[in-house]
Image (cartoon, rainbow, N blue to C red):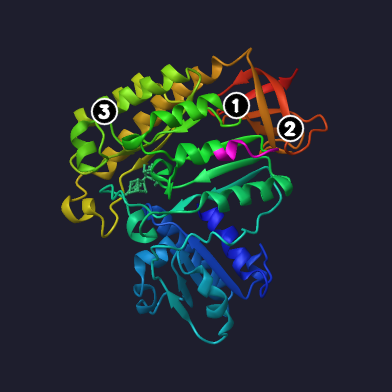
Amino acid sequence: MNEYDTEILKSILGSGFLFTTDPGEADIVLLNTCSVRENAERKVFARIYQLKHENPGLRIGILGCMASHFKDKLFEQKSLPVDFVAGPDSYRQLPEMLARSQDSGFDVTLSEFETYENIFPFREKGVNAWIAIMRGCNNFCSFCIVPYTRGRERSRSPQSILQETQQLVRDGFCQVTLLGQNVNSYRYEDTGFPALLKKISRVEGLKRIRFTSPHPKDFPSELLTVIADNPGICKHIHLPLQAGSDRILKKMRRKYTRQQYFDLVGKIRDVCPEMVLTTDIIVGFPTESDTEFWDTVDVVETVQFDSAFIFKYSPREGTAAAKNYPDDIPETVKTERIIQLNGLQKNISLTKNRAHIGETHQVLIEALETKKSKADVQGRNDGNKLVILTNNDYRLGDMLNVRITGATAHVLKGITE
Ligand code: SAH
Ligand code: SF4
């Protein structure tokens, strides 16, 4: 979402400013920030001091969720060298803010309506384009700061999303990923998320459609049939679990039980047995006992996710959990739990990936080198798994039939047929 917001920002600032990726060359550095866990914020503070140390004349702006989270505190803390603060709904004010060359600027007002729908983001050429179909969130899960930093949920019109998708195809993109904090609650007049997906799947020339994330509490059956019936919609669902114990799920205000989660997974696999499932999990939520942690382990063992992002609980100021429950699980216990769960998930991912050896997957090439080798290319299969193969004059956006010949917990390796 922040990458996408940065593309919107670049479009808004495009006519009056020049961009550089080298901070040494910049007069102004804007940091687009995340507040979802304390660690993300800590990194931003460290970066501000480092930038200012390297160039004391630099003007620095904090954008995004940390702007909303800290509001005027960022200015009150005189020691913090920040000149601009703009929340996620204030980006249209930025050109004016930055143009006042000697002043500082501040706007963290959250809007009920801003979707930046008439702004065509400035994207680097590539294979995948992000499109936010909605902004904000109304769910108020007790651990989560997003509803406070990004404001109320609002959806963008299907017409504007479709027009943008058509333009993206003309610009050479072959995949779109639709973004929303809970895509299942997308609604614009009488269009819900399944209908929106169906409309996008008819855009000519688009090879793949992905989306993230659907909340398990309100997953419509129609969404499953739309995914199953449309080859262009990838067979991958990111379905955040968060916890496997009913008591903890209730305290998290997730509005589903472990059994309902199991039932949903069963329904998904009945309609589409090959669906790749991934998830998010939080360990060490306040009062989580060993037994309750093992309930999460049990769900992970039972569901057999393809992969999982696992986080230690991080109290976020202003949220219901931070107000009502002391962060009482010691750091050492959180660490033990995350190691345990990551170890289990790694074995599951490895077993699942190895089972693909010998199969043929359609792979969309997205990079013409890998971290390890300039002789290899990488792409993703329909289920969003990374696939690496030796380069043979391939181009970005090529869709190749690849026979899987090897697997680790994180990547598949293959050769073209
Ligand atoms: N809207 C998405 C989640 C967005 S935040 C959804 O509901 O699925 C991405 C992930 O960060 C969450 O799924 C959760 O696992 C994690 N997260 C959010 N707040 C957190 C906190 N306070 N501590 C630790 N992890 C957190
Ligand atoms: Fe946060 Fe819950 Fe909204 Fe996701 S659905 S952004 S976890 S409040």
What span is colored magenta in the figure?
A: 199-205
Tell me which label, 1 or 3, sits earlier in the chain: 1
Residue 125, position in %: x, y?
71, 50
Residue with the mark numbered 3: 258
Identify which amino acid the numbered label 1 is placed on.
Pro
Q: Of all residues shown, which one is farthest toward the right?
A: 393
Q: Nearer the viewer, mark 2 or mark 1?
A: 1
Name the secondary structure under disc 3: helix
| CA–CA distance in space, label 3 to label 2 | 42 Å
The label shown at residue 41 is none
Give the amino acid at mark 3. Arg
Left or right of residue 80, residue 362 in this image: right
| Residue 81 higher or lower than 317, as above or below | below
SS at mark 1 in the image: loop
Q: Image point 77% across, 33% down: which residue? A: 375
Residue annotated with mark 1: 231
